[in-house]
Amino acid sequence: MASTKPGVKSKLSEGAALATRIREWASSPSGKEVLSVTLREARDEASRLERVQRVDPKAMLQFVTY
Amino acid sequence: MTSGTEVRAFDIPAFKEVLRNASSSSNPAIESKPQVEYLESYFATIKPVTMVVEQEYIDRDFLEDYSAYYVRCFSPYSRFCKRILFFSESFTESDFMALLKGTVSPLTIQILKESFLGFMVLKPLPFSVIGRTCLKTFKDNGERTYPINRKYFAHLCGIELVVESLAFQEQDSVAGACATTALWSAFHATSRKFQHAMPSPFEITRAATTTGFNASRTFPNAEGLSIQEMAQAVRSVGLEPHTVAAGDEATVKSAIYAYQFAGIPILLAVELWDIEPAEPKIVAGHAMAITGFGVQGTPAIPVGPTKMLDESSRINRIYVHDDGLGPFARMEFDGKMVQTDIKNGVPRLEYSLSTTWKNDTGNTGSIRAVPKFLIVPVYHKIRIPMRKIHIEIAQLDHWIENIRVAGVLPTLTTRLNWDIRLVTGIDVKESIMGSSTIDPDIKVKVLTASFPRFVGKVTAILAGNPVAIILFDLTGIDQGKAFLTVIPLDSNFAANMKAVASEPTLEAAISHTPAWNVFSWFKDN
């Protein structure tokens, strides 16, 4: 059986540990709360950015420069 | 035969005398115009020592305006302009003549070329004499940048001189007012960048007013242009106007950052307010061309409710071609608010920029510019506005940051910074080709890939180091997926993103948002 190099092995175990850590957090009550809040806030921010940059066609006609 | 050129030592009185003599009225009031006052301070920085005045100069822009309007005036106007060329070296008329004759002279062609500071065309009009003006900019020191500048060539007696600048002129209130003049300066940049014909001020005003919305007469154009008409002028040269409401400071800064690095000028429409009276009063609507900007050395400032760290927030000043002042006039984002209205006792406060305009009482510092609109003249294939990219990244940033704060991403020790700008596909490949830190396999993959001509390039920066480049296709359609690909620059960051994207609970939460485009790339690669 081919052996895994020590550096690669350590990377793999790091990756597995990271995945476990994220899974545990995401399924915890606090993690679920963060996900739900983030979803709402990210959408709110997108709407806010759309709103501040939206051009009012009437204002475009009325605003005259000298 | 008399000489058509005059060499003079430069000083402000001599400059003003040339200006006054160039006008058809020799009106001494020309010397105290705001533009002349502004140029005095500009010259104090670039320090011309000698000027060469060409007595008869044919300027294409003025000739167009002349043939369209001035030639039909009862009072005769000359079709010839004058042109002043400025130099930082001292030389005399006899030095210059000796150079032309090929006899011994301390002046050489090399000295002329190296000391050339730019030129100014003087129109033979009664008062608005400052025509096409291309002056060397202040030193680009990293904190101050003029990405719109291009090369201008001036031929003096068979000697080719070059200056990096962007053309400026003052309005004549006949062929055009401030909007026309701002468009004219902007087109000087876009005509070179996007290969379109360069219209004169008269042609710009005529094209802008074909919509027929303006109830007043077109020429003389003292009435100015509406935003709608300015947008029409942009269309008339074959470009498309991306018009954005300048709703907040962050919007203005992100647009400047995104487009100006690509060499695209931006037209800025503002309201000028005088805040000296107890109750601030509006002075006028005004338009100018943004031709550069400055950034402060401090880190990015958190923006908006999500506190995104956008590199564009470091912009603390802009440079504009303002026909009421001069070229590269400085305006600062200094945080001052202007009360523009009051309803039921509640004042309406709007952000503003400083200006160097003088108010009615002759004071500088009280005229504030309240931004209203930005018009970005872009090539028709730049279809997706950079604001769409900005909105997608704002959402992505919020997801990454909230997961990071939970402490589950070991690589993300600090919040990401974002650098969002428009580039070309060629720019992307050139930057990758020149990099010695990117993984060789990724490098080959990127260099051999096919990219659209215009790309939104977003660099994620962690503690000062770029960790990923996210690319968006700007040539697609607004309702489609603009996301193109990711170029990972840091394997640890990529591993963290992959771990997040591979977790089913997170995928379920994020997959219906635009942020998922980037996460899913990390999952699949």
Image (tube, helix red, strand yellow):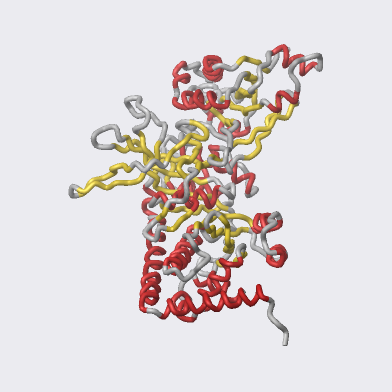
Give the residue drawn at x 53%, y 17%. Answer: B12
The reply to whether residue B279 is visible in this rendering is: yes
Position of A11 relative to B91 (above/below)? below
Residue B202 drawn at (x, y percent): 53, 37
Image: B216 above or below B126: below
- Could you tell me if residue B180 is visible in this image? no
Image location (x, y in percent) of residue B502: 53, 78
The image position of residue B120, as x and y in percent, is 59, 27
Occupied quadrant, residue B370: top left
* Residue at figure coordinates x 44%, y 26% from the top left: B34
Residue found at x 59% / y 54%: B379
Q: Looking at the picture, how far across and down is residue B223, in whole percent?
A: 41, 38
How many circles with numbers are drawn on the protein?
Answer: 0
As drawn, is A5 to the left or to the right of B219?
A: right
Residue B72 is left or right of residue B316, and the answer is right
Q: Residue furthest right?
A: B103
Residue lying furthest bottom in this view?
A: A1
**Left or right: B278, with B33 as reference point:** left
- Viewer-side residue, B34 vs B410: B410
Quadrant in which the C terminus of chain B appears: bottom right
